[in-house]
Amino acid sequence: MSITVRIPGSLKDWFNGKTEISCTGNTILECLENINGLYPGLKNRLFDDNGGLHRIMIFLNGDHIRQLDGPGTLTEDDDEISIIPLAAGG
Amino acid sequence: MIIDNPASHFIFIFHSLAPLGKKYTVRNQIEMTNGEVLQYWGKWIILGERAYLDEMARKLDPLVEQEKIPCVKYDRTPSVNLDLEECVMMVYGDRRDRDGIFQILRSFGVKLKAWITEKETMELWLPGGQLLERWLAGTDFDNVRKDIMREDARMRLTYIFDHPDEIFTPWMQ
């Protein structure tokens, strides 16, 4: 299984200069945990102390996961996850 | 038609007949109501440097004129008061047409795929909404002015939610 994760250029320091990486996982949360294993500290950038998404928006194949099942949204092979700053959605 | 008024934070792409009253919240030649805008309207998000978005705007301008894309708006400068380091472009449309619009964007090299509904955006800009409150926190407004801004946002946006059958009327930005 391979899922593509994309971020804008302003966040590329999250992925050591890359704006596109691959991950695996059956849900958005599993994918984020998989990425966190590759880029330690990422979860702290994404989630606040209460476990809520922190100043970012996450999209699965273009759809905001808040409109789906949140971090528990199921993912499939060849899916695309996009992460942008919350303010970019306004 | 690219509208670049330095007095505005945003640069817009509208159809050339927009100054004569042509509306962009139209589908199948019928103007959308507030309820329909809340149900169907949204935008694809593109982030990048100003020069990149200027180039993208030049590519999208004829497509807006051909009515393949209703309208576009993007930042003149990054909204640093919202902690943004890049400019944001919003390519608007009806979600029933969004896949076709994204195919256009993909053909121009856009890869990051983020569709945000206008309903969600409006909720973020209501009093107490994350974006309105963060924007206010970044200003030097006193509390009285902030409350005035909150009330203005509340009146403007709740009107849309409370009058779903009225024809949607956009406002100057």
Image (cartoon, coloured by chain):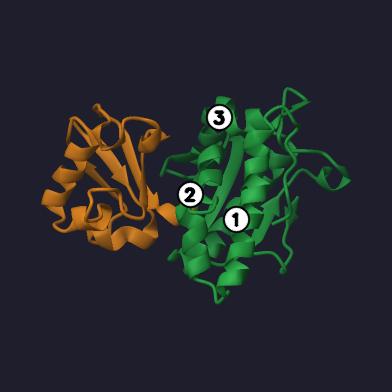
Chain colours: A orange, B green
Mark closer to the chain start, 1 or 3: 1
Residue under mark 2: which chain is it in? A
According to the image, label 1 marks what residue? B74
Residue under mark 3: which chain is it in? B
> Relative to B35, is B46 on the left or the right?
left
Cβ–Cβ under 8 Å for marks 3 and 2: no
Write the residue at 72% across / 45% down: B170
Which mark identifies residue A89? 2
SS of the residue at dot 3? helix
Amino acid type assigned to the residue bearing label 1 in the image = Tyr
Cβ–Cβ under 8 Å for marks 2 and 1: no
Residue A65: horizontal and vertical position, in percent?
A: 35, 36
Mark 2 closeness class: few <14, some 14–19, many ≥20 residues within 10 Å: many
Write the residue at 18% across / 47% down: A35
According to the image, label 3 marks what residue? B95
Cβ–Cβ under 8 Å for marks 1 and 3: no
Q: Is residue B118 above or below residue A86?
A: above
Write the residue at 54% across / 72% down: B139
Q: Decide which of B133, A70 is in the foreground and name it.
A: B133
Mark 3 closeness class: few <14, some 14–19, many ≥20 residues within 10 Å: some
Most extreme residue toward the left is: A37
Q: Decide which of B19, B68 is in the foreground and name it.
A: B19
Q: Is residue B72 visible?
A: no
> Relative to A44, is B161 on the left or the right?
right
Residue B32: horizontal and vertical position, in percent?
A: 71, 29
Q: Which mark lies nearer to you, 2 or 1?
A: 2
